[in-house]
Image (cartoon, rainbow, N blue to C red):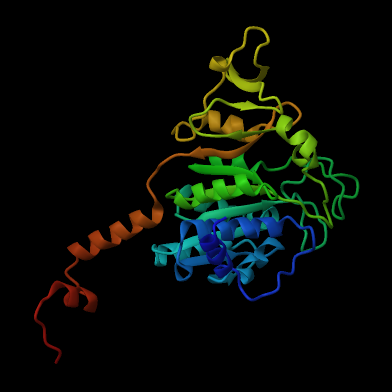
Amino acid sequence: MSENNKLAFQEYKSDQRVRWCPGCGDHAILNSIQKVMADMKVPQEEVAVISGIGCSSRLPYYMNTYGFHTIHGRASAVASGVKVANPKLHVWQITGDGDALAIGGNHFIHAIRRNIDINVILFNNQIYGLTKGQYSPTSKRGFISKTSPYGTIEYPFRPGELTIGARGYFFARTIDKDLKVSTKVMKAAAEHKGTSIVEVLQNCVIYNDNTHKEITDKQFKDDRTIVLEHGKPMIFGKERNKGLLLDGIKLRVVTIGEDGVTEKDLLVHDAHCEDPTIHLKLADMEYPDFPVALGVIRDSEAPVYDQCARMQIDEIRERSKIKTFKDLVTSGEVWEVK
């Protein structure tokens, strides 16, 4: 990071002491968000960070920007209102798997469906951390917790599947401590017009430590994850010799050089494709059958709600016979107050 960027990075830090547990993945996510804002040179007064309730939702306190710590599950609703009221603001929503997908599930899917231009960072540690260790909508089936002492019998939500199913046009995934991938996908989310969802596989050291270890541990990560890049073949593995291809309507993991498979046989990632079929398959991949997909999985275009709302309002005002004070002033008409 250059000296200028280091200074800019510091400007996004508030004067509040960060109160997350030592070792919590939230620290790395905060750094990634601040770095992205510094790299993009977004003026602090043009940023609003909105959160709900949960450990992740303390993040607005640590940002030297506008912020709003709202109520449980309602961050999407408030962030939507902020963006529609002031489309010039860069609106970031900070939420967790419990806040967004349980009590906030309705607001979450409708913000996506409407395609409001907000950036949602979804911290997924598969547990309720702030309320002391209950299972969440993303907890693995069979997970033992205070509220599932014999193991949960529910199947978890897959945030990527939920996003694409709600007609989402941007979905990315990263790991809390992977700053390189995190900053890359968060920047892509900020540049995307419409609702962007970034799922961060985050670790809770107190109530669900090592929940993502099978794919995040250094000795396994390269063989158990794949970082997708638009326009590039889907290759992964420590030796860069594994890949994905389409076998009928299913994805299949192959080894380059075996059974006549060459790099030319592999799928090339098209993040911009409007058809979400392959994106959904990629988002749903789970270890051990497949590598877990990281990076920008889907980044397609569609009409943006707040832009359409502003255009509709302007058109109605133009046709209306009722003129506001602003209309009279900007039109240059001569008028008299009696």
Q: Position of residue 65 (x, y in %)?
A: 53, 70
Give the quadrant of residue 282.
top right
Give the quadrant of residue 331.
bottom left
Tell which residue pokes out farthest to the left in this image.
Answer: 334
287 up-or-down from 152: above or below: above
Which quadrant holds the N terminus? bottom right
Tell which residue pokes out farthest to the bottom in this image.
Answer: 338
Q: Position of residue 100 (x, y in %)?
A: 63, 55
Q: Residue at x 26, y 62 (%)?
A: 314
Tell which residue pokes out farthest to the front in this image.
Answer: 3
Q: Residue at x 61, y 48 (%)?
A: 182
Towards the viewer: 154 or 43: 43
Which quadrant holds the C terminus? bottom left
179 up-or-down from 44: above or below: above
Tell which residue pokes out farthest to the top in this image.
Answer: 260
Tell whether 222 sits left or right of 190: right
173 up-or-down from 289: above or below: below
Q: Residue at x 82, y 47 (%)?
A: 210
Towards the viewer: 334 or 251: 251
Tell whether 271 sits left or right of 251: left
